[in-house]
Image: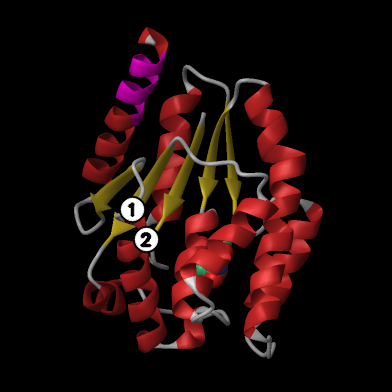
């Protein structure tokens, strides 16, 4: 089973990924991974992508994200799914579609097709989309050090958020979560949804 978490920077994905991991880990074999990163090449790519002073062409940025992901799928995600593990991924294709497709203006369908190629058509069973108004995130969560992508400005984030909304509306396996609620409420909703999903799968 493959679960991904999506949403803008600062929305609380990483915390929720960790909480879901701890919840499932009691009864299942779970692997949690982060995008970009996890593999050796992925971590090197992550460093390049997030360095503040790197001037990357838009296309280069896209290819680097996809290079990291294609390593991750071949070396980690596919083998783990084959072993029957639950794989939880902090960001996946929908991030690239929202950030590069909509945010950088490359185009959602073009990026989608490239993502499908890079990931051998793997699709998550559940996509948790953590959502909060941009103004809320700017006020409450966008603080401290910023990486290269976080330095892209509010208008960029507006495009990314609108892109997420637009794209995810078309997908059947998305669970949209109000991330302004407290952490415990968000995590218990997510855990309940996954438990129910697993129970339904067993009944099939
Ligand atoms: P993270 O902070 O969630 O680890 O993500 C790193 C940054 O990279 C974040 O600003 C989102 C961005 N990103 C993209 O622009 N495209 C992608 O495909 C992914 C996975 C992340």
Does residue 13 lie above or below 144 as drawn?
above
Q: Residue furthest top?
A: 203
Tell which quarter ligand 1 is in. bottom right
Q: Where's residue 16, x and y in %?
A: 39, 46
Q: Where's residue 75, x and y in %?
A: 77, 41
Magenta highlight: main SS: helix
Q: Which mark is drawn over residue 167?
A: 2
Q: Residue furthest right?
A: 40
In the image: residue 171, left or right of residue 146: left
Q: Which of 16 and 201 is in front in this view?
A: 201
Q: Where's residue 169, x and y in %?
A: 29, 55
In the image: residue 193, left or right of residue 70: left
Q: Which mark is drawn over residue 80?
A: none
User: Cα distance, mark 2 to mark 1?
Assistant: 6 Å
Q: What element carries label 1?
A: loop
| Residue under label 1 | 170
């Amino acid at each position: 089973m493959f679960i991904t978490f999506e949403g803008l920077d600062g929305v609380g994905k990483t915390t929720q990924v960790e909480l879901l991991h701890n919840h499932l880990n009691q009864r299942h074999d779970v692997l949690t991974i982060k995008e970009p990163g996890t593999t050796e090449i992925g971590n090197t790519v992550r460093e390049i992508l997030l360095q503040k002073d790197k001037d990357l062409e838009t296309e280069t940025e896209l290819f680097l994200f996809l290079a990291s992901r294609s390593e991750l799928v071949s070396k980690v995600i596919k083998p783990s799914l084959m072993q029957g593990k639950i794989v939880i991924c902090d960001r996946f294709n929908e991030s690239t579609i929202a950030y590069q497709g909509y945010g950088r203006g490359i185009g959602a369908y073009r990026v989608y097709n490239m993502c499908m190629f890079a990931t051998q058509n793997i699709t998550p069973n559940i996509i948790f989309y953590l959502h909060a108004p941009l103004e809320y995130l700017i006020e409450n969560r966008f603080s401290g050090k910023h990486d290269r992508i976080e330095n892209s400005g509010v208008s960029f984030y507006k495009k990314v958020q609108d892109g997420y909304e637009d794209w995810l509306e078309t997908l059947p396996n998305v669970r949209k979560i109000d991330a302004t609620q407290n952490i415990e409420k968000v995590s218990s909703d997510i855990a309940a949804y996954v438990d129910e999903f697993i129970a339904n799968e067993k009944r099939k």
